[in-house]
Amino acid sequence: MAEALFEDFLTCPICLEPLKEPVSLSCHHSFCQTCLNKTWNTRPNKTCPMCRRRSSRETVEVNFALRQNPEEPG
């Protein structure tokens, strides 16, 4: 059961794939950077796709702690 929770933690809630170039918002939800950017490009406000909390930043940085392979060039 713990393994399933860990896999969910490393899965993008937008594309349902393992996180690629993961970014985390101030609400602590994480997404693939590409998925979040595509979502934000379709909305007038930069809100979290999960909880709808408004982001305090215009751009977000990659969360290296969540990357699957930190040695992978990116």
Image (cartoon, grey):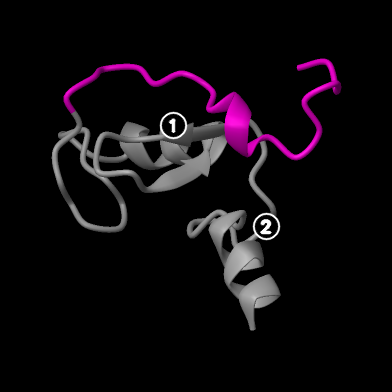
Q: As drawn, is 47 to the left or to the right of 73?
A: left
Check disc 2 and give the amino acid type.
Answer: Glu
C-alpha span from label 1 to label 2: 16 Å
Looking at the image, residue 45 sits to the left or right of residue 40; the answer is left
Q: Quadrant of residue 55?
A: top left
Specify which label sits upstream in the sequence, 1 or 2: 2
Local crowd size for mark 1, using a 10 Å CA cut-off: few (<14), some (14–19), many (≥20): some
Query: Few, some or many C-alpha atoms within 10 Å of disc 2 (few <14, some 14-19, many ≥20)?
Result: some
Q: Quadrant of residue 32?
A: top right
Asked if the residue at tag 2 contacts the one at tag 1, i.e. Cβ–Cβ closer than 8 Å, the answer is no
Q: Amino acid at mark 1?
A: Asn
Residue wearing tag 2: 17
What residue is shown at x 23% (from left), y 19% (from top)?
57
Mark 1, residue position = 37
Q: Is residue 12 covered in magenta?
A: no
Q: Give the image location of residue 48, x and y in percent.
A: 27, 46
* Residue 4 x, y percent position in the rendering: 65, 76
Q: What x and y, as percent, mark residue 16?
A: 60, 62
